[in-house]
């Protein structure tokens, strides 16, 4: 059985019904090759959605990507729900399930359509005017209500189970658009042997040849020629042909973003197929063959279902074999609609009348229409459409007024002319120019190596289009060094259209009750645009934002030119003086999935793990993220919570010893005859006199004098320093060093090498640390005399090379064992076995933080924030007083940085030792003062210290070092906490344990 | 995504490989410690931020890792020229829009 509106023998699809699908729960039959739109129309369904603002019933306006009305939700399963799919581009598959949107309770009866009646309240600018009072109501009441009422689709509520792929591609000639122009350009370029990519958004190539029944090329029907030409291109090794692929963005230097819809048209896409594929193409030359989009006529109630573009009706008939009505009317200001009437009439469809706004048009199509017995009316306008859920009549009047006549119709095909698709040209930063004669914006000055051909260039007629496109393809190939040698396609027959009109036709009326739509998707009428001008908008950019014309998901593909013309007419200015709004990417909506690609979940960001990570995992460590690193946070034993584990780890380190994985510390080797000179310039400290084998705590500043990084530096030899940085700071410190070495101090003979990942670092800290390490070490005298605190030796441990640092970030006797990363875990396990004999523990980053805070050692980035000088941090001792230059030497002594009252790092003890302050909490001097209080600092580090038996904290406090012993206050939501300002060292103030 | 010619690699490479490093030709004083407050302000804080031709530093971060200089038109985003660090400001610019 053939669906009621499918015409036997018409169109190119095999009309055997192979696909069943549903719309709003009703089942229908379609055929292979249908879009959802053509399949619904074949079943006589025009009502497809409700409009955005007024909830007016809407049908299909177009048969392509420019569709503003026919937005539906396609649901494959509970997670695969895609809102706002244009039914005119969604290919049908067996079992497709679509739902209408923006209606309640049903599509044919929508309560919110009352908004249509109340529409005087919802006119242009209503968002800005109506709902602004009282102010608080906007956020809490109006905005949520409007959003709920105005929503286009509903976003999916589950994670997207599909995957999306991405590819980079390079070519000599990229052809965007696969109609007659694009195919001709691609043929010309491809025949020279250069690399060509041809792209089209539709399932099949051909563009307007889908409906242009009058085109004959190389003795074939136009559409058939397109298929055979593309088939030939596909066989060529130098050509890539991409269908179902939209060029959505044109960026600098011929970089074009494409999205290929790989599986949205398949019934059961294999799991190996991505849903979409993002192509990022760099082309030496780009040929824009993006065609033109037909405009509608602007008249009262021009949005009733059944009223559509004439070219859409032709596409449904000539390609899909579907008629959009039984008795159609035509309203036009342009020849191309005649062809639709002629095609339908020849297919046996009744054509009630053609209404042509022009006074005395002449030409072959007009003659042909007359010869077929179609009633043709010149100099008349359709002033109103009848019907609600479906158009039922058109009311015609002479355009300068006079008697009205109402003609019953079940569809109106309209054409106000064609708008060249200059979107991608405009995105390429080319400047459009207005052709006053044809009333079109066409490409003017080019900004990139691209060329426009065919309809998008304002070129009329198939012969001229193919000539222009073929020449452009050949020239693009020649520009990249190849010579053309092919055969230009020969046009045997074509259709020729004249111009058309812009703006509102008579009947769009100044009448306040008339709704003559300019922008269907955002419900903008001719009246709205006039009103915007009357309310003072002068530039088209302002009119656009005030009315929202062209701001919906279709980006005004059918509405921009009409809106502009109405604004210009109302302003009494020529169109080019009012200007065209800028076109921006994307050309049509692009899914987040295609842009994100594989970069989601675990692939969103690299995860870095140390050599010792697997051991820590086996021990049940809890990890924390530090930048991209996974670091062992603490090692809970059975029954321990975090606090219990951290307390035990902290106590064990100070009682016996602990092992800590410090591999993530940044490490840079500074090597060369001028290494010490370089270190003098990059750090505040003096280095020239540091003996090989000794270490020093270094501070790095930026030129502005603020602390940038810190770390212990060991001098391995006169020309070799082993520099450590903070974990998070490693890349930027390396960049900072390279910058100065390459650009400010290029006279220094120095090499910098990142060695972070070459060395695993095992910190062994605590009174028993030497006893644990010594049995495994060869070639290094471990005595205090030979290896004092802050020294470094090279030797072997467990038979592998080591750089053994004697240093401490806990205040205990301590070592940091550097071994090649591949041996990291083996050496750790050997040290662990030794440690077990002494009752040592493994400790994580939390215990490390507590232990260092007990000693008042700072962490750059926690206790400093980019506005802290060495003096502020109490680190003046680390600044070489005799040095004449280092990065930051001048910035550090700027007036504000040496003024009194700066925030300085101090210790804080809560009066109640059990209370642990919150990091980041603000500090005030007087808790009784009025709110807002004057804040004099904040807590930077705060912990429970089991070793001290109380809480400890570090804080930045204004004039802090002059406040020792003072009581300050930390106001919190529930209580104000009293604190005493103290020194920064809470444990072993004399530092005796370093040798303990 | 821009294409940038690295003067060391002598190749045009995609922007992803590079990192901008601020305005070029701002020399660090050889007598830094002796700079006046005003001179330091000019050196550290004041940048030209022009509409049009800018001289700026880039680093071929994910390539040869070298810092170099570039001349770019901030209106069109077009690179007019790149040259090695330490070389003087070019006297002539090819195809400058102004
Ligand atoms: Zn390079």
Image: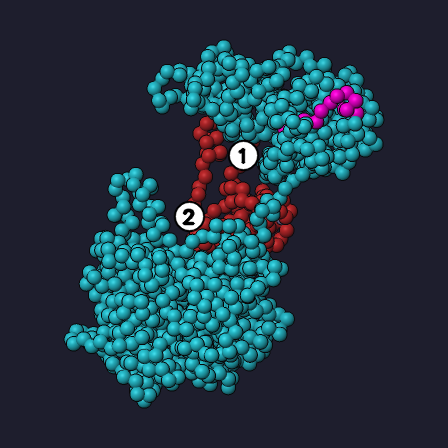
Q: Position of residue A367 (x, y in %)?
A: 31, 87
Q: Which residue in the structure is indicated by mark 1?
A: B28
Name the residue: 43% across, 22% down: A974
Q: Position of residue A661 (x, y in %)?
A: 69, 30
Residue A47's place in the image compared with A165, above or below, is: below
Mark 1: few/some/many CA within 10 Å (<14, 14-19, 20+): some
Range of magenta residues: A834-846
Please determine if labels 2 and 1 lie on a single subunit.
yes
Residue A637: image quadrant is top right
The chain in red:
B
Q: Which residue in the structure is indicated by mark 2?
A: B51
Residue A343 seen in render: yes
Q: What is the CA distance from the residue labelled 2 to the residue labelled 1?
A: 25 Å
The hue of chain A in the figure is cyan
Report the mark closest to the observer, 2 or 1: 2
Q: Position of residue A991 (x, y in %)?
A: 66, 14
Chain on which label 1 sits: B
- Whether residue A621 is in magenta: the answer is no
Left or right: residue A956 compared with residue A117: right
Q: Secondary structure at mark 2?
A: loop
Looking at the image, the residue that sits furthest to the left is A402
- Whether residue A836 is in magenta: the answer is yes
Q: Nearer the viewer, residue A743 or A789?
A: A789
Name the residue: 42% across, 24% down: A973
Indicate if the residue with disc 1 has its beta carbon within 8 Å of ligand 1: no
Residue A883 seen in render: no
């Amino acid at each position: 059985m053939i669906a009621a509106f499918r015409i036997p023998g018409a169109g190119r699809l095999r009309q055997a019904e192979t696909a069943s699908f549903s719309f709003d729960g009703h089942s229908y039959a379609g055929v292979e090759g249908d879009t959802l739109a053509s399949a619904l129309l074949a079943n006589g369904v025009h009502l497809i959605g409700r409009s955005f603002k007024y909830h007016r019933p809407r049908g299909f306006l177009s048969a392509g990507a420019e569709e503003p009305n026919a937005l539906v939700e396609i649901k494959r399963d509970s997670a695969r729900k895609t809102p706002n799919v244009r039914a005119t581009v969604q290919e049908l598959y067996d079992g497709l399930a679509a739902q209408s949107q923006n209606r309640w309770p049903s599509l044919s009866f929508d309560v919110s359509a009352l908004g249509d009646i109340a529409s005087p309240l919802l006119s242009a600018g209503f968002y800005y005017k109506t709902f602004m009072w009282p102010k608080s109501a906007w956020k809490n009441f109006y905005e949520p209500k409007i959003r709920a009422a105005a929503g286009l689709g509903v976003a999916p509520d589950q994670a997207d189970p599909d995957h999306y792929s991405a590819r980079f591609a390079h070519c000599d000639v990229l052809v965007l658009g696969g109609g007659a122009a694009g195919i001709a350009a691609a043929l010309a370029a491809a025949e020279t042997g250069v690399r060509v990519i041809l792209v089209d958004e539709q399932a099949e190539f051909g563009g307007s040849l889908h409906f242009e029944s009058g085109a004959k090329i190389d003795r074939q029907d136009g559409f058939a020629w397109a298929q055979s030409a593309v088939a030939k291109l596909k066989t060529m090794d130098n050509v890539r042909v991409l269908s179902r692929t939209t060029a959505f963005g044109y960026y600098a230097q011929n970089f074009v973003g494409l999205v290929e819809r790989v599986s949205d048209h398949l019934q059961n896409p294999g799991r190996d197929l991505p849903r979409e594929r993002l192509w990022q193409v760099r082309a030496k030359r780009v040929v824009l063959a993006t065609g033109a989009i037909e405009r509608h006529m602007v008249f009262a109630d021009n949005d009733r279902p059944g009223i559509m573009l004439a070219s859409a009706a032709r596409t449904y008939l000539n390609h899909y074999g579907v008629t959009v009505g039984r008795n159609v009317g035509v309203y036009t200001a342009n020849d191309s609609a005649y062809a639709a009437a002629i095609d339908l009439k020849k297919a046996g469809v009744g054509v009630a009348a053609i209404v042509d706004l022009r006074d005395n048009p002449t030409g072959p199509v007009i003659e042909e229409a007359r010869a077929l017995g179609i009633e043709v009316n010149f100099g008349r306008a359709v002033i109103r459409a009848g019907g609600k859920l479906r158009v039922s009549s058109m009311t015609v009047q002479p355009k300068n007024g006079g008697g009205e006549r109402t003609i019953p119709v079940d569809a109106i095909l309209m054409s106000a002319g064609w708008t060249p698709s200059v979107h991608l040209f405009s995105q390429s930063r080319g400047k459009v120019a207005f052709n006053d004669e044809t009333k079109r914006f066409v490409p003017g000055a080019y900004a990139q190596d691209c060329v426009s051909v065919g309809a998008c260039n304002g070129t009329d007629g198939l012969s001229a289009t193919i000539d222009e496109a073929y020449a452009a393809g050949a020239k693009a190939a020649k520009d990249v060094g190849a010579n053309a040698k092919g055969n230009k396609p020969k046009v045997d027959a074509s259709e020729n259209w004249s111009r058309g009109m812009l703006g509102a036709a008579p009947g769009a009326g100044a009448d306040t009750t008339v709704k003559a739509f300019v922008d269907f998707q955002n419900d903008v009428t001719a009246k709205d645009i006039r009103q915007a001008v009357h309310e003072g908008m002068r530039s088209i950019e302002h009119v656009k934002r005030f009315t929202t014309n062209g701001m919906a998901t279709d980006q005004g593909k059918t509405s921009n030119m009409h809106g502009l013309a109405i604004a210009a007419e109302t302003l009494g200015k020529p169109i080019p003086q009012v200007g065209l709004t800028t076109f921006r990417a994307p050309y049509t909506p692009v899914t987040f999935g295609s842009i994100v690609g594989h970069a989601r979940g675990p692939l969103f960001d690299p995860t870095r793990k140390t050599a010792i990570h697997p051991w820590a995992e086996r021990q049940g460590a809890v990890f924390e993220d530090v930048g991209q690193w996974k670091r062992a946070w603490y090692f809970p034993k059975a029954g321990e919570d975090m606090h219990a584990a951290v307390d035990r780890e902290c106590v064990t380190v100070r009682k016996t010893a602990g092992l800590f994985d410090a591999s993530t510390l940044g490490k840079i080797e500074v090597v060369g005859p001028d290494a010490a000179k370089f270190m003098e310039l990059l750090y505040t400290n003096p280095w020239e006199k540091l003996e090989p084998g000794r270490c020093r705590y270094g501070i790095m500043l930026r030129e502005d004098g603020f602390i940038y990084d810190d770390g212990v530096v060991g001098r391995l030899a006169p020309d070799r320093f082993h520099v450590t940085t903070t974990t998070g700071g490693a890349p930027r410190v390396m960049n900072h060093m390279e910058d100065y070495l390459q650009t400010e101090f290029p006279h220094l003979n120095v090499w910098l090498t990142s060695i972070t990942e070459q060395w695993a670092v095992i910190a062994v800290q605590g009174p028993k640390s030497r006893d644990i390490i010594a049995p495994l070490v060869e070639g290094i005298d471990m005595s205090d005399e030979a290896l004092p605190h802050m020294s470094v030796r090279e030797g072997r441990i467990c038979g592998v090379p080591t750089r053994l640092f004697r240093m401490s970030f806990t205040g205990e006797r301590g070592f940091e064992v550097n071994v090649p990363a591949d041996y990291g875990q083996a050496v750790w396990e050997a040290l662990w076995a030794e440690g077990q004999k002494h009752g040592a523990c493994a400790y994580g980053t939390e215990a490390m933080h507590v232990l260092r805070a007990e000693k008042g050692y700072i962490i750059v980035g926690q206790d400093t924030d980019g506005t802290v000088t060495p003096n502020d941090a109490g680190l003046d001792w680390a600044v070489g007083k005799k040095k004449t230059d280092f990065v930051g030497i001048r910035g550090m002594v700027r007036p504000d940085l040496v003024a009194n009252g700066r925030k300085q790092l101090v210790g804080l003890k809560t009066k109640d030792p059990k209370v642990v302050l919150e990091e980041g909490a603000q500090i005030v001097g007087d808790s009784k003062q009025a709110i807002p209080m004057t804040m004099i600092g904040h807590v930077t580090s705060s912990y429970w210290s089991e070793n001290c038996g109380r809480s400890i904290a570090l804080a930045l406090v204004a004039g802090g070092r002059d406040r020792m012993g003072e009581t300050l206050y930390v106001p919190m939501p529930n209580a104000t906490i009293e604190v005493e300002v103290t020194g920064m060292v809470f444990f072993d103030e004399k530092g005796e344990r370093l040798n303990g | 995504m821009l294409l940038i010619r690295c003067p060391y690699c002598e190749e045009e490479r995609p922007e992803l490989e590079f990192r901008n490093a601020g305005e070029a030709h701002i020399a660090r004083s050889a007598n830094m410690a002796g700079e006046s407050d005003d001179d330091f302000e000019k050196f550290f804080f004041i940048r030209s931020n022009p509409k049009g031709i800018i001289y700026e530093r880039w680093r071929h971060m994910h390539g040869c890792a070298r810092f170099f200089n570039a001349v770019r038109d901030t209106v069109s985003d077009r690179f007019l020229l790149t040259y090695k660090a330490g070389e003087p400001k070019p006297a002539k610019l090819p195809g400058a829009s102004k």
